[in-house]
Structures are given as C-alpha cells and as structure tokens.
Amino acid sequence: MKYNVITIMLLLLGGSLSAQTVTEKELREIRASFVRDPATRAIQNVLTNDKNIRENALNRERQGKVDHFFKYRVTVKGITDQKSSGRCWMFTSLNVLRPGVMVKYDLNEFNFSHNYLYFWDIFEKANLFLENIIATAGKPMDDRGVTEFFKNPVNDGGVWNLYYNLGEKYGVVPREVMPETAHSENTSGLLSLVNERLRKGGYTLRELVAAKKKRELLQAEKLATLKDVYRVLALCLGEPPARFTWRYRTRNGEIQALTDYTPRQFYEEITPSDYDPKSYIMIMNDPTREYYKVYEIENYRNTIEGINWTYLNLPNEEIKRAAIASIKNNEAMYSSSDVGKAFDRTTGVLDPGVYDFNALFGVDFSMDKKARILTRQSGSAHAMALVGVDTDENEHPVKWQFENSWGTTINGGYLTFTDKWFDEYIFRVVIHRRYLSEKAIKSLDQKPILLPAWDYMN
C-alpha cells in the first residue's frame, strides 16, 4: 500500500485524521453539483468574457443609498498623494497635523516633506535590521526570527509609532525643503537594492560572529553597510538637510521666512506639547483577543531607541464614542483599516453590502471579523485620517469619512464608509486619551502583553 507524505506525517504525529485524495465518487458528486441551468449558463457567459468580477457583483440596490454629507467634520484642506509607495502611515500621521500648521503660519495650503522622513525611516530600519542580525547571529539561519529578518530587511510600511520615533529624532521639514523624487514616489526599485545590500551585510555579520571576531570588527562592518545604504538613499532621494530656510506666503499675501532652522526645531514648533504616546493612544479592535488589555508587537519600530507598536484593545462601540468626541472637537485621527474590502472606487463608498458575491456565484463567502483575522483573510492594510461622522437623530453614527492619500481621483480624495463597514474593517485609531472612558484609561496602566514580530496583527 502506498501512502502520500501528508498521510505518513499525520500517522507519525498520532493524528486521528489521515489525509485523503478526492475519490472518483466524490469527484462525480462535485461535478454533478454544478448544474448548467439557464441562469448558471448566463452567469458563466458573463464572467468568462469579463475579467472585472467586482463590477458584475455590484449591488444595485445599494447604489445611491450612501451620500457624502456629514453632520460633524474636522476642518481639513488639501489632499496628498503617496503615489506608488507604502508610506500611508507617514502621510496620515502628517495629515492629522497639517491643519494646525496652516493655522499657525496663516497659510492657504501646506504640506510636509514625506521624502525627508522616508530617507530617515529606511536608514533607521537598516540599522535596526543589522543590530537584529548581530543579536541573533548565534541562532541557525532557519530560526523563525532570523528568517523573518532576512525575508524582508526593510520596507516602507509602518504605523503611527514609527512617525513619532522619526519626528522625535530627526524632526520634520516643509515639502519645499526636500521635495519628492521619482524614487520616493515609486519605492520598489530603491527598496530592492537596499535590501540586497543589507542581506549581504547581514550575512557577513553572521560569518564574523561565527568566526568569533571582536565587536569592533562587527561595528566596522555594520558601519560600512550603513554608509552604502546612505549613499544609495542620497543618490535616489537627495541628501536630507541639517538646517534649512523656508519662505512662504500667508493668506493675505505677505512673504515670511523661517531662517536657519533645524528639522527638530521646526518639529517642536508645529507639534502639540502633549503629542506623545502617553497622551495619544493607539486603540485597536481585535476580536481575537481580550478587550481592555494592552498589547505590544515585539521589535515593531524603526529606531533602536524608539517605541514599539503598542495598542489598547477595545470593543468597537468604545472606539466609536471616542472618535465621535474627537471629531466634534475638530481633531482628526490617525486610523487604519482593510480598505480593499467592500470598496466601490467609482463612488468612493465602503459598505459591506456594496458587492453581492454570494448572489453572483451562489456561494456563501461570509466570515465574521474574528475568523477573517485568524485566517489572514482580513487585516489592516492602509492608513487614512478619520475626519468626519454623520449621526442620526439619536446621535448614533450612520457613516464616517476618511481623508485619503491617493490623490483626488476617487471622490476628490475623501472616502465615505458606513457604520457597518466600521464594525467589520476598522482596526486602529490613534486618539487623545481625554476622549477615552475611565475604564479604558485605567487599562493603560497594565504591562503590555508582548506579541511576536510575526503576529497576525502585524
């Protein structure tokens, strides 16, 4: 008798369920379940001739049911565009601060230099990678942590704490001081080269550790690698300024200037005095874990000395109450969600009922949020500023609004999502603690539960 590999493994592990191939009888039953009646033939004809499944699943009953008017909306102006990059977390963190800068300097418009922060983000992530490689050099190459490091040494994704780490160390500058380049707007080629050099440097460091070389030699190799990373970044992005002068025009047409400023000086000038992780809390809706508990993702940061991604897990109703209070007080919030789900790009509407794939295919695709998270079917994919909410006569939320960073093509740059979509696909919000309940604030005092870097919430 022949056994396949999976069956043998299960038997060795003492599993009661042995792997089985699809039998001829089962295959006949499966084939018979596909009944080619007139309705099925019509759907097959449509789908085999049209590659856009979403458009064919568009639920016409939901069209026009969601408008873009809001009872409460933060005062925001101007839409940014991250282009072909994963810098949504950076754009959103800065977009939340932009309105205050425009008020402070009496501007009609303003934008930060995302290229400036992007340079330092990749540089710092490179240093963190190399230090992680040194710290784990005694472990085998197939160790889970080592594998994770080499699989993706650096990338341009992140969450709010990465912005905070960079701002505190390097400050920020206006867009005109260090404009975007072709490689800050389309990052894949640059990241590929940086990662190739980092893998080489990381492998060399492991070899030096194996040969029991002194720490001085390790540091010299690390420094050589960082010099090369800096060179690649400077050639593709430009070199970040240590000091700058910024001239700007006020609303009434006056020309003003900030002369001989450092990026840190500008950061301190435009940042609220209580802008720190003690006041601004990342809250999460993760139904797979206990609520009113604090969690920390191990090693999820960009600077060695920076803070890791840490969040307080709360039920959606608690998050909504806090978010409404923040919006009513004219304070936008960093938020992130699974924006690719139930999203009609034509209208800029996100709603669980916008597509009806169940009806189109006659297949039940439904899963609850917990199941989608655990099976990796859903997760936070994109950060946007949460700026608006519309409520009914009882002040219960009906729909919400994002300020996006994809330019103005889709609904002028603003996305509207229903309250049901909030329940299913909103994951993170960064909000001032004054809007949280007493129970939530008390929960912040506990020691965070440490989660591995490869956690499914990452």
Image (spheres, rainbow, N blue to C red):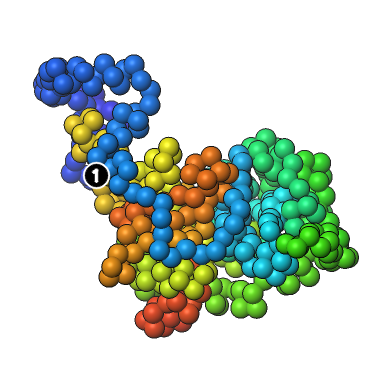
Tally the numbered discs: 1
Q: Residue at x 41, y 51 (%)?
A: 68
Q: Is residue 104 left or right of residue 360?
A: right
Residue lying furthest front: 252
Decide if residue 59 is in sight here: yes
Q: Residue at x 24, y 44 (%)?
A: 366
**Label 1 Cα neighbours within 10 Å, binned few <14 / some 14-19 / many ≥20:** few
Above or below, 9 relative to 106: above
Percent position (x, y) of residue 318? 35, 71
Q: Quadrant of residue 56?
A: top left
Decide if residue 379 is in sight here: no
Quadrant (top left/top right/bottom left/bottom right) for the N terminus? top left
Closer-to-camera residue (289/390) = 390
Percent position (x, y) of residue 253? 78, 60
Amino acid type, callout 1: Ser
Closer-to-camera residue (298/16) = 298
Closer-to-camera residue (82/219) = 82
Closer-to-camera residue (155/399) = 399
Above or below, 220 relative to 377: below
Percent position (x, y) of residue 114? 69, 52
Q: Label 1 belongs to which residue?
A: 366
Q: Is residue 116 left or right of residue 59?
A: right
Q: Secondary structure at mark 1?
A: loop
Percent position (x, y) of residue 110? 69, 57
Q: Residue at x 35, y 30 (%)?
A: 55
Q: Residue at x 67, y 64 (%)?
A: 102
